[in-house]
Amino acid sequence: MLDTFILFDRWITAQISSLLPHSAFFDGLFSFFSLHGLTFIIWVLLFFIFWYQERKDKTHHHFFFAFAASFGLTSIMVNYVLKNVFLRARPWIIQGIMNTGCPSDYSFPSGHASGAFAGAVVFAYFDKKRALLYYGIATLISLSRVYLGCHYMLDVVFGALIGYLIGKVAIWLLSSRKIL
C-alpha cells in the first residue's frame, strides 16, 4: 500500500511538473515565492501592509498574536515532529541532482506549504475581502516547492492541509477564549 502511494505521488509530481513551463520567467517567479526557506518574510511584509492599512483599528494586536500562534504551532508540528516521523527523502536527493537550492532535511510534509496556509488562514480571518489573494499566495508558495524539485506534490498537499487545519484550530481556540 505504501509503495503504491509513493509511486502515485511520484507520478502526479511528474505530471504537474511537466505541465508547468520551465523558463527563466517561471524560474524567477517560483524562486521568489519559495525564497529558499524564507517564505515567512512574505507573510511579515503582508503583515506590515495589513497593519499600515488597518492601524486605526486595534485588531492588529490580535492579528499578530493569532499569526504567531498559528505559524509557530505549524512550524513545530511539521519541522520538529512530522518530518522526523516520516523521514521521506526529497525528490532532488533521490534523483541525484546537485545544487538545487533546496534544503537537505526531510520532505514530508512541506513546511513551506504548511506555513503558507497557516498564514493565509489568519490573514483571511482578519481581512475577509482579500482572502482569495492570501490563499492564492499560499498556493503559489506551495507550487513553487514542486516546481523547484524540493517536494513531491503530496508533500505539499498534506503540508497545506496541516497548516490550514492548525490555522483554523488556532483561530477557533483564540476566539473561543475571547482572546481575538
Image (spheres, rainbow, N blue to C red):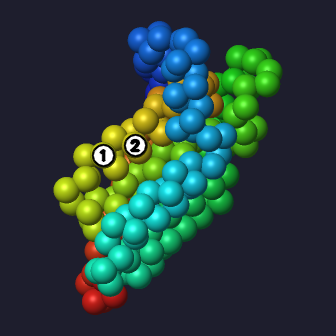
Q: Which mark is residue 137?
A: 2
Indicate the position of residue 2 as horizontal and vertical percent values.
51, 30
Q: What residue type is labelled 2?
A: Ile
Number of marks: 2
Establish if 27 lies above or below 109.
above
Q: Which residue lies furthest to the left in this view?
A: 129
Which three-letter amino acid code belongs to the residue tagged 1? Answer: Leu
Residue 29 drawn at (x, y percent): 52, 28
Q: Tell me the quadrant of the picture where the C terminus can be found.
A: bottom left
In this rendering, position of residue 111 left or right of residue 60: right
Q: Nearer the viewer, residue 43 or 78?
A: 43
Question: SS of the residue at dot 2?
Answer: helix
Q: Residue 133 carries which label?
A: 1
Relative to 156, say whether 66 is above or below.
Answer: below
Task: Please tell me which residue is depicted at 33% across the width and 67% down the height of the picture.
Answer: 53
Cα distance between the residues tagged 2 and 1:
6 Å
Q: For the point 50% across and 71% down, which residue is it?
A: 68
Could you tell me which residue is drawn at 51 percent across and 20 percent down?
26
Badge 2 vs badge 1, beta-carbon distance below 8 Å: yes
